[in-house]
Amino acid sequence: MGAVLDRANAIAEEQFVTASGPGGQNVNKVATAVQLRFNIYALGLTPRVFHRLKDLAGNRLNSAGEIVIDARNHRTQDANRRDARERMAAMIEAALKEPKTRKKTRVNRIGKTKRLAGKKAQGQKKALRGKVDF
């Protein structure tokens, strides 16, 4: 897991752009927002992890295979850079976690009869809502 994050940090490209939000007049002069881009093909992930990462990225994934993370919540470049890197790491770690497989459960005889009795009662309730015929 650590090797993948190291590889992602190595191939990630940062670009600083001007941002809206907190910063006062400084916001017009200093490019504090960070656009972090990293290519998911260059990470060398297994197919299952690759598809999970693609699903997690959603519309942050562009046609070139790059995930673009925008960080513009903080007033400084350093804080925004840290935020973008943490978000990238969290996304990759989430993709690396294997989801739990669902185990089939079986309802016992008592559970089946309770469920059917509930369905019967619900049907009876709805049948009484019908048109009244004198």
Image (tube, rainbow, N blue to C red):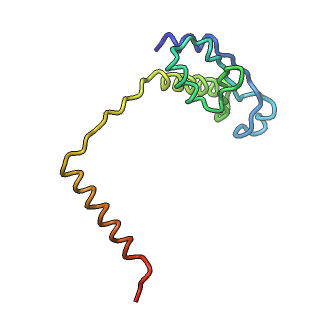
Q: Farthest residue in the bottom direction?
A: 134
Q: Farthest residue in the right direction?
A: 29
Q: Is residue 45 left or right of residue 21?
A: left
- Up-down: is 61 above or below 132? above
The one nearer the camera, 124 or 8, is 124
Q: Farthest residue in the front direction?
A: 134
Residue 72 at x, y percent in the picture: 67, 33
- Residue at image point 77% right, 34% down: 26
Q: Quadrant of residue 88?
A: top right
The one nearer the camera, 44 or 75, is 44
Count the marks. Answer: 0
Q: Is residue 91 left or right of residue 77?
A: left
- Up-down: is 78 above or below 103? above
- Up-down: is 12 above or below 120? above
- Residue at image point 25% right, 61% down: 117
Residue 115 at x, y percent in the picture: 27, 55
- Up-down: is 20 above or below 38? below
- Residue at image point 64% right, 35% down: 73
Residue 124 at x, y percent in the picture: 33, 70
The one nearer the camera, 31 or 49, is 49
Q: Is residue 100 left or right of residue 19?
A: left
Q: Quadrant of residue 126?
A: bottom left
Quadrant of the rendering where the C terminus is positioned:
bottom left
Q: Quadrant of residue 6?
A: top right
Residue 17 at x, y percent in the picture: 76, 27
